[in-house]
Amino acid sequence: MKDRGKGYLALVLHAHLPYVRHPEHDDFLEEDWFFEALTETYIPMIDIFDRLIDERVDFRITISLTPTLISMMTDPLLQYRYLRHLNKLIELAGREIERTRWMPEFHELALMYHYRLSRARQIFLERYDSRLIPAFRRYQELGFVEIITSGATHGFLPLMTNRTAAAAQIRVAASHYEKHLGRPPRGIWLPECGYAPGIDEVLRDCGIRFFFTDTHGILFGSPRPRYGVFAPVYCRSAVAAFGRDRESSKQVWSAEEGYPGDYEYREFYRDVGFDLDYEYIRPYLHGDGSRSNLGIKYYRITGPTPAKAPYNPARAREKAAEHAGNFMFNRERQIDYLSGILGIKPIIVSPYDAELFGHWWYEGPEWLDFLLRKIHFDQDTISTITPSEYLERHPKLQVITPSMSSWGWKGYNEVWLEGSNDWIYPHIHMMSDRMVELADRFERVDGLTARALNQAARELLLAQSSDWAFIMKTGTMVEYAQKRTSDHIARFNKLYHDISSSRIDERWLREIEGIDNIFPDIDYGVYRTRM
Amino acid sequence: MAKDELNKMTKAELVKLARSRKLDVTVRMLKAELIRVIKSDMKGKKRKKPSGGKGGRAAGAPRSAVKAKAAGKSRSSPGRKAAKRAGAGTKPKAAGKRIRESAAPSDKIPGARTIRQMAESGKYYLGSEAAITQPLESIEIPKEYGIDRIVAMVRDPHWLFTYWEVTTQRYDELERMLKDEWPQCKTILRIYDVTKRKKVHSDIEPGTEARNWYINVPSGRRFVIAVGILSPDGRFIEIARSNTVETPSGTVSDVVDDRWMVPEEIFERIFAASGGYGAHGGSAELGELLGRRLEEEMGSGAVSSLGSGGMRRGDMARGFRLKVATELILYGETEPDARVRIQGKEVKLRGDGTFSLRFALPDGKIKLPVTATSGDGKEERTVNTAVNKSSKEKAPVLK
């Protein structure tokens, strides 16, 4: 992209889901996390990027694809189950077209869902042959999108006491990235944006050149950041840190002025899974038959009232265009102001959880589409940029040590360390220490012992996912998060004892390998203290 | 019924059997899948009603005992150790490889691979399932690890978290060592500030039951925590010592880099533009929204059939409501090869010539002419149906 305008906008989408895949069950509620994200976020996003590129709209955006998400997107069982899920929904949408025949407002919506779901299937199956990662890889190779990595299983790094184990999160992620995207990652989205001094050194050792922190990570860094969060800084390790802009974040997230709460937008909490007659909807629910969201939602937010009005996609789309225009206008004003006081071209870093777009905020993908088009066609003040491009053009940066920080509630580590979830750490830390001990102890082994060691590494990584602690804190689905954590702890400890006593249960190991099958190529040697 | 017997049945027979047990099955399910569903249902009912096998036909019987509840205790039910089956060793990786191989470029017909992929994935997934015994019920997570240790963690600028373990052997040793003093001894945590020279910051007496503690400390300093015994004469006998942790400053730094100096008032403006005067919060908005999202999205387990749809905070003063909707089911049958139109629109018949449609019913009169044309096109029959629907909402009555 031409270096036009007075400043830059770096949009960053963090795409992550924990590894949820249960071959031991025919269908599994939590796998819907992934399926819904595909239908509502990732496939629409791919659709948008494809069209932008076809229509020669120049744009830049950064997307972090976590290794767990990549693993699920490339898993044949989940691909198969996604199609099964999608086919059921398309069938339901078809029945809805009939059912709503005399209710024109809902009938139109049923037609819309049928069309969109069918289109999702067409993109998934026919355009991409069930494999979405090559789409992202192509965007990166064409220079529009920079794909960055994250922790292997999204482990929250500031709460890891064993540095070798923390480094393994990054090393495993980097080699996984390289396998799927064809080159090593230049940047990383630290899980939960969690940073503590020293983590940058681990990144440097893995060849990673930049990361992001929340606003106060940079603002409270030492010495003072000369340009606030409007220029990246170098850590002493020469790894660059980009700080999150608050103003652009507030525009999306603020309870009062945030876009997703607009009354024209689709209401997330009204879903046919709850609204329609039980017997009718039963075939589309999960095996145990309890009602759950199905993704067909007929109402708009309407206002602070329980009497919701039917959703009108055309009006919502107009709103999305208006909001995109508003966002761009505000960034232009922000850049005008900042370039006046800074004396350099400012960069505004706007990271969002990718699932905001589409899953939570149904019109989010359209908003993004409008925004990128408007920036390309309608103005000259800002240009979108990726961190790598910025660093190439502006290699001279101030050196500071960022402050410990995260983008969680209250800005530090409390979300993942409080009464509901602090019980996990004695186990996870012990597992980390023991994994390192095993890797140092068993230098050259193969066959069964190596398989057991590799599986122990997988169990540790899966136990470390920040999602479990997060879910325990948020208070629902807690049992699942607890069970996942306990399972991984238990499996690891059994492996540890079996390996130590040279009594590996091959049959059991094979089962566990089939269930917790993430990172098929992992080498437990990443846990060795002497590399 | 033994599994062998089920295996001998045809798929159609299995579907019939499953439906007679009120199980949700479709003809598209694989045979093995059907057998599994039926088997689990039998087992589930046996557990519930050990005395008789008739439970399966009772109208109120659970539809399927296979599936877990939302957060899954039954997922790991210890009773369900799947029998080891012949040829059960197929690993997911092998199947995945097959699928990738099948995606060779020669395979150009759209959709062709799809069916194969689905079939192969389907086979793979059942095969794998057969290999899996319900894992790990017998393995519990350890309560302690038998090692004297203490670990410190930072929660935020003002709070540390620490957990520790002291083995009974160690306590026994100390008891032998301290003899008569032992009953007056206390386990304490000693917090050292090691920012510059090591000095004691504070002592905490957590009591005998606690294994972890949150500790209030100043920001921007380094700490080490020791767990040990405090004797009545004030001696501290250390048992274990933690890693070093540093609390973040929680504020803007005093240190200014000479090479990147700006006048204070300019920095003030940059700081303000960065959101510096509200930067302590992190993205609370984000965390909370996403938290709520997870909660709403999956919190289905306990929700009654009226659901939580659309209820936002403070929506209604009393939380009482009534929603009524009317739907119409129109069904009938004709010859399997006939063509049926309702309101002029063609309807798809089931294999046996039956059809059924379901409509949401608005107020007013709806006419539903149903016309069937015989397969040879020589005969036509019509039934004119009409429905009149009205609903009126009365003003609420508060008693």
Image (tube, coloured by chain):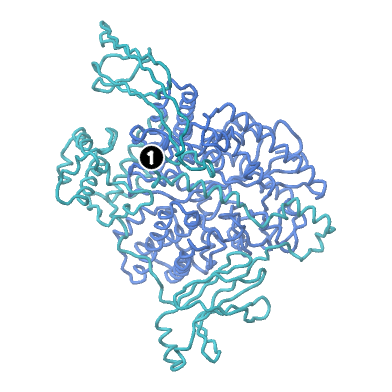
Instruction: Note whether A378 is above or below A190 in the view shown.
Output: above
Q: Position of residue A101 (x, y in %)?
A: 42, 21
SS assignment at label 1: loop
Q: Position of residue B350 (x, y in %)?
A: 28, 23
Residue at 17% x, 45% y is B3
Would you say B79 lies left or right of B221 here?
Answer: left
Instruction: Note whether B258 is above or below B327 in the view shown.
Output: below
Instruction: Note whether B122 is above or below B330 in the view shown.
Output: below
Q: Position of residue B90 (x, y in %)?
A: 30, 49
Q: Which residue is mark 1?
A: B305
Q: Quadrant of residue A273?
A: top left
Camera-nearest residue between A228 and B193? B193
Q: Amino acid at mark 1?
A: Ser
The colour one sees for chain B in the rendered image is cyan
Residue at 78% x, 42% y is A6
Query: What's the chain of the residue with tag 1?
Result: B
Camera-nearest residue between A216 and A74? A216
Camera-nearest residue between A292 and A390? A292
Chain corresponding to blue in the figure: A
